[in-house]
Image: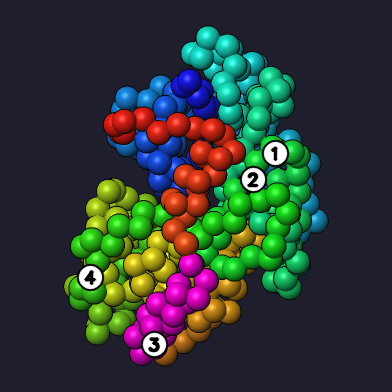
Amino acid sequence: MTKKILIGICDIGMGHINRQTCIIKELLKYDVDILLTYTDNNKQILDNNFPNLAKVKINIPWIACDKNGIDFKKSLEISKNRKINYYNEFLKFCIDVEEYFGGKPDYVFTDYECNVASYSYAASVPLLGMDQHSKFLFLEEEKLGEYGIKEESSRLKFFFPKVDYRIISSFFPLPDIPNALLLPPIVDLNKQNVSDNNFVLAYFSPYVENKDFFEKMYNMMKNDKSNNYVLYTKFDFEQQDNIVVKPFSNDFKKDLRECKFVISTSGHQLISECIVFEKPLYLLPINTFEQHYSNLMVKRYNLGMDINDDYTYFINAVDTIKKNMIQYKEKYWKDNWNKLINDFFEKNLELKKKHWHY
């Protein structure tokens, strides 16, 4: 019997949608009927990747947090400025879901997306939490200056107080977590066309609002005449003899596979992809606990350095870091995520393979 699955994907950054693209491709090997959520931020990508899958629009509220937990006053200000009636929009979403399926789905999957989680609670449909953030419910606090783990754990408890199944992916080793499937990073494992060409890839995240955040790094790149750079950014940084500036596009995936090393903010998914392709990391963590924690893990396991480390020293250490990455994967990433997750789908959700797949 065909299993009906509703999948919610957070639209902040590229990590959630890249992770779920991998998951959805695995799901489509089974007899399933999938309904995806979308926002204006990720609709184009979802349409390009899955033109034949049905989609339903959502509006995602922004809950502001700091090291003490949820900042209710700031969250209220953001909600007022957005002028969206989230309650009415949520009810419309629930109606659209049940009209599409002709009733309730069999399962709801969430990658850090709250609308589908709320629907699962209201409709008594089993919820599968599938993300990398949930690990912060179980990790010990690390001293990271002004950043604290409650920034993540409070938001998780607010949006996702309960799940029926939990899958957590992580590029760094985790302690045993009860009733959870722990996976290495969910990324495209195809290493075809991976090479070390004579350029460095720089990713200045579009979710950073202030150009000044990247000025120091840009000037370091400009002054480094020993390397050529490909820079992805939304800001108006000038092209230089050694810097090619590009808008965000699908070219990024190709450049990631072909570069020598990567300069980036500290997003979990891109870090994971860099480790898979053995691209040493020079990081610029933005002002969230999660990014600073990922940055800490990269440095702890000698997978890269950050903006506080001398850049010339890092460049000279790239070959050593690359070797560390290879040894790290051999030690900590013993199983492929897709095999583990397919076993989970078949044993726990009773999904059945179809004779052809997407």
Q: Which residue is mark 3?
A: 320
Q: Is residue 268 above or below residue 173?
A: above
Cα distance in 3D space between marks 2 and 1 = 7 Å
Which badge, 1 or 3, comes first in the chain's sequence?
1
Q: Amino acid at mark 2?
A: Arg
**Residue 286 seen anywhere in this rendered image of the structure:** no
Categorize mark 1 by other alpha carbons within 10 Å: few (<14), some (14-19), many (20+): some
Q: Is residue 14 above or below residue 304?
A: above
Identified at 40% across, 33% down, the residue is: 353
Which portion, as a residue range, is magenta? 314-334
Question: Alpha-carbon distance for marks 3 and 4?
Answer: 17 Å
Mark 3 touching mark 4, by CB under 8 A?
A: no
Alpha carbons under labels 1 and 3: distance apart: 41 Å
Find disc 1 in the rendering and name its residue. Answer: 163
Q: Residues within 10 Å of mark 2 (few under 14, many from 20)?
A: many
Foreground mark, 1 or 3, reads 1
Instruction: Confirm or deny contact between disc 2 and disc 1 (CB under 8 A).
Output: yes
Left or right of 350 in this view: 316: left
Q: CA distance from mark 1 to mark 4?
A: 41 Å
Foreground residue, 265 or 93? 93
Secondary structure mostly seen in magenta is helix
Mark 3 burial class by Cα count in 10 Å: few <14, some 14-19, many 20+: some
The numbered mark at residue 166 is 2
Say what amino acid the circle numbered 4 marks.
Answer: Ser
Q: Is residue 322 magenta?
A: yes
Earlier-in-chain disc, 3 versus 4: 4
Q: Report the disc number at residue 195.
A: 4
